Amino acid sequence: MRPPEPQPLPALTRAEGEFIDRYLDVVDQIGRINPARGNDTYGALRAAQALASHAVALRDALTLMHERGEAHIHTTTLARALRVLDGERRAGRVTVPPAPTS
C-alpha cells in the first residue's frame, strides 16, 4: 500500500513562495534555539548564527513582494501553504512544551 499523496501547494507567486520558505527557515532556527527544547549550547549557538542570515533573506523576500506591488498578504492561501509544508509542527518547536503531569 502506498502512502497517501501529499496535498498540493496552493498557487503562489514566486515572491510568496520565497516568503513562505524564508519564514519557515526562521521558524526552524528559532525552534533550534528554544531553551525549553534544546540539547546543547553549541547547537543553539549555530542556530542563532544562522538566524541572522535567514532573517535577512526573509526581509528580502518581503521587500521583493512590496516592490512588485504585492501589498496584501493573502493569509488563507499562505496558511494553507504553511500547513502543506508542515508549518504547524515546525512552529510548535518554538513554543514551551506542556508541563509534565505528575
Image (tube, rainbow, N blue to C red):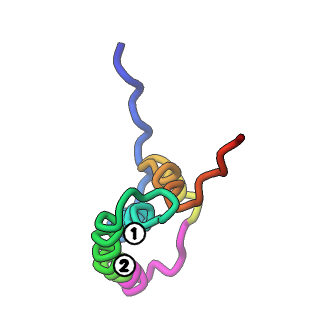
| Residue type at tag 1 | Val
Q: Tell me the quarter of the image containing the N terminus.
A: top left
Q: Residue at x 57, y 60 (%)?
A: 95
Q: Nearer the viewer, residue 7 or 32?
A: 32
| Residue 19 image point, x, y percent | 39, 69
Q: Determine whether label 1 and label 2 are within 8 Å by CB.
A: yes
- Mark 1 is surrounded, within 10 Å at the Cα level, by few (under 14), some (14 to 19) or many (20 or more) other residues, namely many
The magenta region covers: 62-74
17 vs 54: above or below: above
Q: Residue at x 44, y 61 (%)?
A: 31
28 vs 9: above or below: below
SS at circle 1: helix
Q: Nearer the viewer, residue 47 or 67?
A: 47
65 vs 11: above or below: below
Q: Tell me the quarter of the image containing the C terminus.
A: top right
| Residue 56 image point, x, y percent | 32, 82
| Residue type at tag 2 | Ala
Would you name the residue on which mark 2 appears?
Answer: 55
Question: Is 65 a magenta residue?
Answer: yes
Question: Is 48 a magenta residue?
Answer: no
Q: Nearer the viewer, residue 43 or 70?
A: 43
Which of the 4 quarters of the picture holds residue 64?
Answer: bottom left
SS at circle 2: helix
Q: Spot the residue most to the front.
A: 102
| Residue 29 image point, x, y percent | 37, 66
Q: Residue at x 34, y 18 (%)?
A: 2
Q: Residue at x 28, y 78 (%)?
A: 53
The answer to whether residue 67 is visible is yes
| Residue 85 image point, x, y percent | 41, 50
Q: Nearer the viewer, residue 15 or 82?
A: 82
Would you name the residue on which mark 1 appears?
Answer: 26
- Using residue 89 as the reference point, say whether residue 48 is left or right of it: left
